[in-house]
Amino acid sequence: MSAPTVERAYSSADVDADYKYWSAANYLTVAQIYLQDNVLLTEPLEAQHIKPRLLGHWGTSPGLSLVYTLLNRHIRATDSDWLYVTGPGHGGPALVANTYLEGTYSEIYPNISLDRAGVLALCRQFSTPGGIPSHVSVQTPGSIHEGGELGYALTHAAGAAFDNPDLVVACVVGDGEAETGPLSGSWKIPAFLNPIRDGAVLPILHLNDAKISGPTVLGRSTDLSISDYLSGQGWAPIFVEGDDPRVVLVAFQYALTRAHDAITRIQHAARNGRPELGGEWPAIVLRTPKGWTGPHQVDGKLVEGTHWAHQVPLSGVRENPNHLAQLEQWLLSYDPRSLFDDAGAPVQSIRDLAPVGDKRLGATPHANGGKLLQPLVIRDLQNYSLDIESPGHTSHETTRVLGEMMRDIYLDNGAADGGGNFRLFCPDETASNRLQAVFEATDRCWQLPRTKFDDNLAPDGRVMEVLSEHLCEGWLEAYLLSGRHGLFASYEAFAMVSVSMLIQHTKWLQHAAALEMARTRRVPERAAHQHVLAQRPQRVQSSRPRSDRRGDSSGP
Amino acid sequence: MSAPTVERAYSSADVDADYKYWSAANYLTVAQIYLQDNVLLTEPLEAQHIKPRLLGHWGTSPGLSLVYTLLNRHIRATDSDWLYVTGPGHGGPALVANTYLEGTYSEIYPNISLDRAGVLALCRQFSTPGGIPSHVSVQTPGSIHEGGELGYALTHAAGAAFDNPDLVVACVVGDGEAETGPLSGSWKIPAFLNPIRDGAVLPILHLNDAKISGPTVLGRSTDLSISDYLSGQGWAPIFVEGDDPRVVLVAFQYALTRAHDAITRIQHAARNGRPELGGEWPAIVLRTPKGWTGPHQVDGKLVEGTHWAHQVPLSGVRENPNHLAQLEQWLLSYDPRSLFDDAGAPVQSIRDLAPVGDKRLGATPHANGGKLLQPLVIRDLQNYSLDIESPGHTSHETTRVLGEMMRDIYLDNGAADGGGNFRLFCPDETASNRLQAVFEATDRCWQLPRTKFDDNLAPDGRVMEVLSEHLCEGWLEAYLLSGRHGLFASYEAFAMVSVSMLIQHTKWLQHAAALEMARTRRVPERAAHQHVLAQRPQRVQSSRPRSDRRGDSSGP
């Protein structure tokens, strides 16, 4: 574990550098949404440079990129391990832009090279048939969280943090998503996250006031209400608000440093036997305009800071010369000549701002479970056979045997030492489901006060009981995608509660498996260009050991 | 609207009377769970009086009955209209007991008569094949909320309160249910409930510390945390805590009076054009022991106040003479001789404590939508036909036409005057779904601050947009079950999010329809005894006008 961090100097030159990085991310975001040619604006913008159909979400993107920019700086300063979960995953182009700037994108998809041809391919593939989706998906480097159905960002963040003591999961929660039931139920992380053995979750509640076409409840709530809401659930909020980019950069850098210091203090205190010195988990509340730095007004109507900036703020660009001119102005406002070199690659000073190797958010192995997965030790199934003397004479319960099997899985995979890579997730039904043999090996996980009348309840318990199928399913999904093993047990009647999550997760696994399968094929050079999705190595998410299949990789 | 209430005297004699009523409800709850004979304990309890299989939930029941008892008194004192939604609906025997004591049960199911035979039938039918479920269900008088899948109590409470300006919906939220995502997302009622045209929701957060076999997050949170959590979402909590029944009765009576006064003040201020004088919506936080007044210890182990009291606190009663004796003691502790007269009916002094007629919680027409339903005025469908000159030559959007139809439904059903009995529920997708013609007739509903850049947003808007399929579906369900009309529009990809609610609601409608169909048959006297579920009149829940079918009722 790293020592508590101290305030690190953040100079005006740093701010300028970060502003430039952020501008590059914003430029590439806009370019992905709009451009199919002249993507570096080396000549005047014309209608035929514009995509025939404009898709994507601009509104949330600048905020996501600002957080990315400062996480980059913070990771370099502290050499710490971070995972970035973006609830507003429909801001996909921002994440793609940032992973391109840091280099991970081109490493995984060589045809999206760090040059003019690469930027062109990057723009053309976005939200295009045969290309990539407009939201964060399995193809996005560093992602474990689908940006489609909203509500599961925080539960995924927590699932990835479990049993990863050195990891911090930064999790942006949009104020739209914050209205959903599952997200609303996910704030109770402090009751279940153990600061000794688990990593941390840093929620970043991003309030930009609006969702698709109306205001948001938290966006229109006072800071005091939000502070009450979060502190009532065990969080100490740090507020950052503004619309002047350089001021917000400084404020957010400060908030991030303070937050990480608070996390380190909590973990340090707990790991040294003095948890009472730790304090509360930090959370950042970030208020910035929706569609920040985009068109302020369009056709005389305010767009920046309103729901009109949610998706494509300038429409009909091919047909409307005024909109075309405004788009050109918008793109030029980021000064692309200063962002890209003669070859069309992001200038070195920008690329130098990213962390290196696996510290990059797009390259963290915690988002690529297959790299970290250790097979579960499971005893021979014969150990759990039942002797039946004659048919119909004895009575047994199948789940009771399953409980015994899970007990042994716990014992054989580190639970005896308080650790491990297996957890059972269940809505307070473990005993009711007759799985209680697991309590011979471990306890229910609980960080709040206990009484002497509690059963099998401990801070280092590894049975995750919370009365929420959504939390159980979401915790499990992220625990699996970050390379561990688990099981979600539910009453059959209530398994439907979280079925939409299961469908989305299955879709994720399906696409991940397709990536892996394609990787083992030898794809001819020309064909590779048309199969940009096919080359992501080792995107393995599964609860089954796959190490035996990792060896025979022979991809390009 | 009634004038603001004042503190009403609550005497020691009243407390004694309410304690007696509560004892009767508790007695009948225990009797339903355990007894199949000797149900009034007129002779010593023996093994054969005990049901062969013990089912049901004792833990939450005393709390639900305490609230019922004091709502009864409050309704009589104020002549106000209340609906009672019980999130912990698995406390079904408590609700059945209370509706039996107030007389509604016997009116609907004449074979459950107010005498010894009726009490016997009441006990025997409970959680028995051919009888009634152990949780609150469509058969329970006064219910609109299934006590199975947890999470929807508050959203149902709000849906029933919309457009019912004189109704207060008391809604018990268990601390188990409070852990679910949908319930956690439901607290944002103050952002959507209009104090001028809508009724009120009075949440009663019932903390008894435990769920099935572990503690609850809110149960183990401090009052300060809970206060922050609720006030951050627009509620002013009133705390009641205790384990001395007479003290808690007094404290809860006081809290209920204060809460209703606060509601009346908010509505009065808003309805007189001075909403700023109203203050915040009240909520009650009630901390009482789980399984209160039940066995304190069993076999030397603490039960009362722990999760061991969740279901059947004394098991194996037929086989274990000690448990049998303890059950007898428990039943006798309520002094059944003082609760039932010689005929076996609840004594008159108890029955007099209930409100009369439709003011009874089990008889409110707001829980029996068929009694209140006014058919929607819908124009001839020909109005919405599209002229097509020749195939494949013009392009139209079907949902745009649906939007125009809904606009007219709004206009023709009271929206022009700011009222009506129709609402559209949608997760911020009305315009995105091309239904925006509705905004020619009404606005989005919003009680929080507005800006001049908002579109179609108003406190009296009748389009309910919140980014939660669970809230939309739940609001709609209760709006329908309380006798109004509505539509939930969702992106098809996200309709699965709330599909388990839809299944449960459909099951509810199916059972309601079965009750109604059975009612129109002439059931022979003997058969009626075996079809106790068949006689509930007018249990109609539907969004379609049913008045034409109500006329030909010829049931018993």
Image (cartoon, coloured by chain):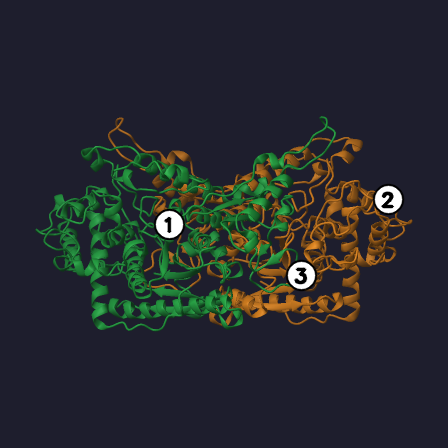
Chain colours: A green, B orange
The chain letter under disc 1 is A
Please say if the residues under marks 1 and 3 sit with CB atoms less than 8 Å apart.
no
In front here: B256 or B9? Answer: B256
- Three-letter code for the amino acid on which mark 2 is drawn: Ala
Using residue A109 as the reference point, say whether residue B413 is left or right of it. right
Residue B286, how many percent across, how many down? 64, 64
Where does label 1 land, which residue? A367
Disc assigned to residue B79: 3
**Label 3, label 2: how far apart the Cα atoms are:** 45 Å
Residues beneath discs 1 and 2 located on the same chain? no
In front here: B549 or B185? Answer: B185
Where does label 2 land, which residue? B47
The chain letter under disc 2 is B
Q: Residue A215, relative to residue B7: is it above or below?
A: above
**Label 1, label 2: how far apart the Cα atoms are:** 60 Å
Q: Residue B294, relative to residue A411: is it above or below?
A: below
- Three-letter code for the amino acid on which mark 3 is drawn: Asp
Callout 2: few (<14), some (14-19), or many (20+) C-alpha neighbours within 10 Å? some
Residue A3, how many percent across, how many down? 40, 69
Quadrant holding the N terminus of chain B: bottom right
Q: Residue furthest left?
A: A43
Residues beneath discs 3 and 2 located on the same chain? yes
Using residue B341 as the reference point, say whether residue B356 is left or right of it. left
Quadrant holding the C terminus of chain B: top right
Residue B541, how many percent across, how many down? 58, 41
In front here: A409 or B87? Answer: A409
- Three-letter code for the amino acid on which mark 1 is drawn: Ala
Residue B56, how many percent across, how many down? 71, 47
The chain letter under disc 3 is B
Disc assigned to residue B542: none
For discs 3 and 2, the disc positioned in front in the rendered view:
2
Tell me if I can see residue B160 in this picture.
Answer: no
